[in-house]
Structures are given as structure tokens and as C-alpha cells.
Image (cartoon, helix red, strand yellow):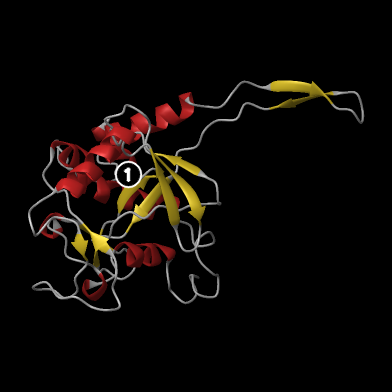
Amino acid sequence: MLEEARQLLAFSEVDTKPTKYDFDLLLTSAILRHLIKVDECGPSEFFNIKNQIDTGTAFLNFCDMGDAHTPHQPDHLHLLSLEDPLTGANAFACHFHTRSGLRITSLEQFASLAVDARHSAKGDASCKVDSKNGLNVCNSYQSSSLEIYAVPAGRVFIFAPKFVGERIELPHIKSPNKQIVSLEVLSVSPRVFEIKNFFSDDEADAIVHKALTETADSHKMKRSSTGATGYNLNSQRTSENAFDTHSKTATEVKK
């Protein structure tokens, strides 16, 4: 499968045991070489052949925003780059995520996600009588789509809500209560979500109990402080907080 992809994409830099960075490079290259068209990306006054401003360059400028705007994460030295066919400059590849935030790291995973999306199509064609003309009206078979989000190098995935009330399921996040963790959209702008099923009522009670019975001065419930060092009170900050960092329940929730 990997060799077929190499031939299809005319791309030979991926080795026989690719890493997630190789996949990033492969898919970025595939999008650049095969999917982007001049008349489909960006406003025409900026992206046109006459002015020699190519949409592929625009895509690579999105993937690699330059050193001043690319945070250096711990894996920065592992990032791979490709050459802009228009300018000849090297640019970091994007990394890619599903709508639920799962990072795609291999062709095999990509193919599996596509198959799962196809198999999770919602319902067969259904028919009903149209009250206006008495004819049968059938809804065609509606397949689920696989939405892929490109994320610039060095940046983290950010959920893209579509409407208030939308539910985004996160099946790749394993919850101890065995229920599906999901986000319910409370606001699109600014982005506000309610996290569903992230922890159970018993876990919440255990964390609260631990916090309220904590005796260590650094972790027990007390007036919130300000500043980076020491315990400094400010008359404008009247909240209280406590910390549960190492209990069994807190550790499970953090994981």
C-alpha cells in the first residue's frame, strides 16, 4: 500500500518504516501536487497564474508560518519539509487530524478511517408519499464524510464547531466510566464547549473530598494568591482553591 502511494504521488522520500512525520510530508505533498487547483483556493485577485502567486505556495505558507510564528514544540527537530515548486523554498509539512482531534499518523490509519466513515453511513434510502402530488419521494442513501483538518507545523489542533448544540464525539479518548466523551458546542465564537462524560459523579466526589480534606499548606483549600513566587494576597482576588494532584482518582482523570 505504501509503495502504491509512493508511485501514485510520485513521491519517493518516505522510507519503508515511515513515522508520523513521514505521513505528514506525504499527505502535504499529495495535497500540493494533486488536490489544489488555482481556481479553487483563495480569492482570485490574489491567487492567479498571471501574477505567479500559486495556491500551492499559499498552502505551504499556511503549513509553515515562518520561524517567528511557528512554536518550537519538543519534536521540532523531527519535523520534515518539502520544496515549494514555485519558489524553491523549503517549508514544513502540515499535520492532519480528524474532526474529533485524532492525529492521523499513517496511511494504514488513514485508510481505516475512510473505511469506517463509509461503513457508518446513516440509514438506507427511505420513502414517503408527498402530500402535494401523491408520489413516492425517497431520500437517497447518505454516507458519512471523513473530514480532515490540516494544522500548521508547531501548532495544536483546535476544534472547529459549526453550530450551537452540535455534539462532537471523541471516540479515541478512553473514559474510565466506559461512556463516549464528547463536546457540546455552547458558543461558536468564542469557542465554548461543555465536556460530556469526561469523568463520573463518583470521581468528581472523590476529587472534591480529597481537596476539602487536604492538610498540606501548598495544596489545601485557601484564599487564591497572586504572583509567580510566594503566597501573596490581593484584595481584588477573593476566590479560594485547592489542589488534588496525586490521588488515585486525580491521576486517572489526568491520564
Vertically, is 86 above or below 202?
below
Q: What residue do we see at 11% from left, 72% from top? A: 231
Q: In which quarter of the image is the N terminus?
A: top left
Snapshot quadrant of residue 2: top left
Q: Is residue 13 visible?
A: no
Q: In which quarter of the image is the C terminus?
A: top left
Q: What residue do we see at 26% from left, 57% from top? A: 93
Q: Which percent across, then down, holds residue 108?
A: 28, 31
Q: Say which of 140 and 3 sits in front.
A: 140
Q: Mark 1 points at which residue?
A: 9
Q: What residue do we see at 7% from left, 54% from top? A: 216
Specify the farthest residue to the right.
Answer: 133
Snapshot quadrant of residue 236: bottom left
Q: Say which of 226 and 69 sits in front.
A: 226
User: What amino acid is labelled 1 in the image?
Assistant: Leu
Give neighbour class at mark 1: few <14, some 14-19, many 20+ (Cα, 10 Å).
some
186 vs 241, left or right, is right
228 vs 23, left or right, is left
Q: Which percent across, then down, holds residue 211?
A: 19, 48
Q: Say which of 195 and 215 sits in front.
A: 215
Vertically, is 213 above or below 68?
above
Which secondary structure, mark 1?
Answer: helix
Q: Say which of 161 and 71 sits in front.
A: 161
Q: What residue do we see at 12% from left, 58% from top? A: 74
